[in-house]
Image (cartoon, rainbow, N blue to C red):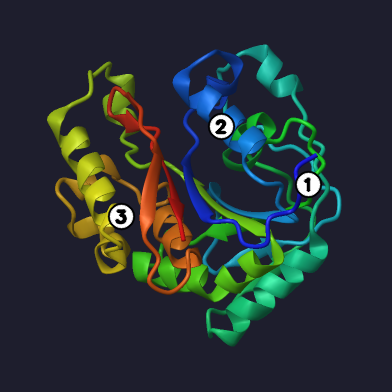
Amino acid sequence: MNAIQSRPPSLFISHGAPNLILYESDTRTFWRDLGAKSPRPSAILIMSAHFETAQPVFERGARPGMIYDFGGFERELYEMSFPAPGAPALAVKAAGLARAAGLGPALSDGRGYDHGAWAPLKVMYPEADIPVATLSVQPRQSGAHHFALGRALAPLRDEGVLIIGSGSATHNLRAFFGGEDTPPWAMTFNEWLAERIEAGDAEAIAAWEQGPDALRNHPTPEHILPLPFAFGAGGPDARGKRLHHALVGPISLDAYAFE
């Protein structure tokens, strides 16, 4: 077992379709290696694009169940479990930090793991023995709001907490199901993100909708907002590093670390 790391970087992970975990791919290998080779966190706090609320909501349940929030996929996905314990104390502490920053959080009790949380974590930590607290995304709020939320929670990293934003660097499902190859507008926005992130340009990522063809890549914002959240959780003067790069048609599966 790896030793607990005192201050892990925050992460942004593009989680893709839930059946990504069933088949060998560069992205699944990346997730597996990321969990196996990184120092073991004390706990995980993950914001999922599939947990949508008007205000920041932290799940404090001790034994979250499974949410199969998708249809038409392989039967075995609906039989999978991710029995990681919840992290009630972490959820309460994180909500307190958000409250102190004036971000109006709330706590929930009884919400399970949706696939934005359990799919990547099941590959990263297959033993499911690290406590996990989940956090909602707020689609009606700005990138700047999500950046501020991440910044408020950044001190948790000093306690070995791994903070993750789980979304997608590009996410136009209509274009994906239309069978498009990777279009120039997806490649351009994806590389704009990488350039701004690695330059430490938090202001640009907080104002992501001003990027090239941003709204074409994200017709709805829930999958991009975990990115400024993760950037903010990197702490003051954070810079990002692209850890993984993959495009499946117009969908980017890129991942970043911030510190």
Q: Residue at x 78, y 46 (%)?
A: 130
Looking at the rendered structure, the kind of residue marked 3 is Ile
Quarter holding the N terminus is top right
Instruction: List x then y, in percent, for residue 35.
Output: 64, 37
Q: Dot 3 corresponds to which residue?
A: 197
| Residue 251 placement: quadrant | top left
Looking at the rendered structure, the kind of residue marked 2 is Trp
Apparent side of residue 173 relative to residue 116 in the rendered image (left or right): left
Distance in Å between CA atoms under marks 1 and 2? 16 Å
Q: Dot 2 corresponds to which residue?
A: 31
Q: Residue at x 54, y 24 (%)?
A: 28
Instruction: List x then y, in percent, for residue 127.
Output: 80, 33
Mark 3 secondary-structure assignment: helix
Looking at the rendered structure, the kind of residue marked 1 is Ile
Neighbour tally class for label 3: few under 14, some 14-19, many 20 plus, Cα within 10 Å: many
Apparent side of residue 137 relative to residue 61 in the rendered image (left or right): left
